Amino acid sequence: MLLISFIISVLSLLFAVYLVFWIKKNDMGTAKMQEIYEAIKKGANAFLKRQYKTIGIMAVVLALVLFAVYAFSGKMIEGLQVSLAFLLGAFLSGFSGLVGMWISVRSNIRTASAAQTSLAKALTIALRAGAVSGITIVAMSLVGITGLYYIYGILGYTAVEIPALLVGFGFGASLVALFAQLGGGIYTKAADVGADLVGKVEAGIPEDDARNPAVVADLVGDNVGDCAGRGADLFESTAAENIGAMILGVALFPYLGINGIIFPLVIRGFGLLAAVIGVLSAKANEEDEPLKALNKGYFVTCALATVAFYFVTMNMLHNILFFFAGLVGIVASIVFVFVTQYYTEYKYRPVRDIANASLTGHATNIIAGLSVGFECTAATVVTISAALLASFKLGAMTGFEHGGIYGTAVATMGMLSTAAYILAMDTFGPITDNAGGIVEMSGASEEVRRRTDKLDAAGNTTKALTKGYAMGSAALAAFLLFSAFLTEAGIKIVDLAKVEVFVASLMGAMLIFFFSGITMRAVGKAAGKIVEEVRRQFKADPGLMTGASKPDYAACVDITTKAALKEMILPGLLAVIVPILVGVFMKAEALAGFIMIGTIAGILLATFMNNAGGAWDNAKKYIEMGNLGGKGSDAHKAAVTGDTVGDPFKDTAGPSLHVLVKLLGTLSLALVALFI
């Protein structure tokens, strides 16, 4: 069965290559569109080159540290293998981000061109481009882990020994994902905030107006943050969760044999097939709402994944209770999508409340947005809790020792069975956003802009949906990794009444808030530099506002690049160093408390930030559609302020917390020998 999964992964990669050729056959639009495209491509390539050079150096240093830890423990050979797996995970995580950015840059111009004649065609191009990223990332994760599994088998390791050797792969993926998400998130929101504050609020010009010196940096940010950063993030998710589930499968080896260990890899392969069919089934009519077509593809993916889950579970685990546990995960993923949709789509009460609050000023808009963010955590926690309790109970009912914990792992696999399609929907967002910017800057007709606005509004919702899904899956995965850490460390109970465990737990919650504070400050500092530069250009050259002069776009791109790379270092290092210090000086049980409470705080804060930010954004979009006074009104100005506050919430700090809560688990697993 593992060989079948490997073959499916390779075939999925070939399908992604086919989609690339299909996308590249589409028209690239007018000469003006191509000029803007070249500027975006140049800026995105320059940022990623400098960012990955920095991340690469840190990855090599940490690989040496990892090797030294194992060597110090008398496990030099094992240390070498884990360190090499770490570098492979880091490389593939970085490559995943590169794939996401590469396809996004090349498809946004084709989406913009297609929107000149057809909304349906533009939607198809954007979704299939997103599918290139989603399918490639999930397939590469499977190929990497399955390949290592076979290599370790050839080297003579047993099926029970191999999962522990894979933890380096997950840690490497987590590390790169954190820095990619941080750097990209700081870049995209610094540029976005700077462009909005001066362009829309002060100068009164439309979004993505060619007269705004920060507009190209803003469009570049969509690619390096929302595509490259999220690509690395979801690669890390699939890798870490597969490895954690495999480690828990070792505990059931007496009952399930090797099948309990390789089950996560096999089911993920069949999930890829479901996503491929789902993408091909997502087709829109000209008059349809874009979300209708996207939701159709998602439900097709869920249905096929459920069928595959049943047959694979019965064939490998021979117990229908584990299928029901997986079904819990699939249902939970659907619930997360609809909870996020309710709180972030303009058709529903929460976003309308924020929009209406904008009528009475900036402060009431902010208050309403914060209220929505706090409120939405209840539905998220109830869903996570119900999924964990139900899957644990179903697993325990099998009668296997450790069956309950394995049930939660199966539920996590169920939730992630649709990961490739979810990532396709996520990448759809920044592609349509960029397409709208290209259309605006190239002076296309109002009809074309209406089509891209429709796609952009759907893209804002899909980005919010996928963040909700990512946070939900991160919560289940964090519990899974936490359970795997307890297993590896030989810990039965974490006693919060012990003072060192309580203190470490308090520090875990503190890290989440301190990390978020530094990340938000980084966006503010970088955005401030962009604001100053845009103001300087407008003041120095009055011809910019009349269109007689061309802005210096490169200056803003360069400022944002330097600021993002500088500001990502501190929060990234903090996330790695603090848990290591806790584990070394306070030992494994205290570190378990640190991870447990840090995870809980991270889930709640990320949910708050993601949904509040998404709601603020779509409240602004709702007003821009002509409601409550429309563009340029006082309500619109208040909504722009709310959106600006929400930008680093939903695109920098919130998504970075997804990675952080999983990094705590993969790091502790990789360095467990140091903490015992």
Image (cartoon, grey):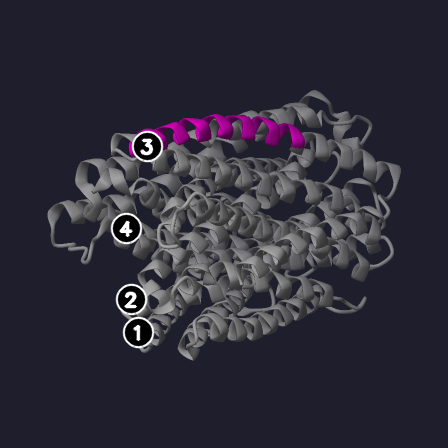
Is residue 56 on the magenta stretch? yes
> Which residue has dot 2 on it?
402
Note whether residue 629 is visible.
Answer: no
Gap in angstroms between the C-alphas marked 2 and 3: 31 Å
**Residue 488: mark:** 4
Say whether disc 4 or disc 1 marks the residue closer to the N-terminus: 1
User: How far apart, in angstroms, are the residues tagged by discs 1 and 2?
Assistant: 7 Å
Counting residues from the N terminus, which is met first, the one under dot 4 or under dot 2? 2
Nearest to N terminus: mark 4 or mark 3 = 3
In the rendered structure, the answer to whether residue 152 lies left or right of residue 43 reads left
Secondary structure beneath dot 2 equals: loop
Residue nearer the viewer, 150 or 237: 150
Q: Earlier in the sequence, mark 1 or mark 2?
A: 1
Q: Is the residue 75 above or below the residue 324 in the image?
A: above
Comparing 479 with 514, the one in front is: 479
Q: Are marks 2 and 3 in contact (CB under 8 Å)?
A: no
Q: Which residue is mark 3?
A: 76
**449 horizontally vs 632: left or right:** right
Structural crowding at the residue carrying mark 1, measured as other residues with C-alpha within 10 Å and reported as few (<14), some (14–19) or many (≥20) = some
State the extent of the magenta-drawn residues as a range: 45-70
What crowding class fits label 4: few (fewer than 14 Cα within 10 Å), some (14-19), or many (20 or more)?
some
Circle 4/circle 2 CB separation < 8 Å: no
Q: Which mark is residue 396?
A: 1
Q: In this rendering, is residue 147 above or below 31? A: below
Side (left or right) of 97 relative to 117? left
Q: Mark 4 to mark 1: distance in Å?
A: 21 Å
Asked whether disc 4 touches disc 3, contact meaning CB atoms under 8 Å apart, the reply is no
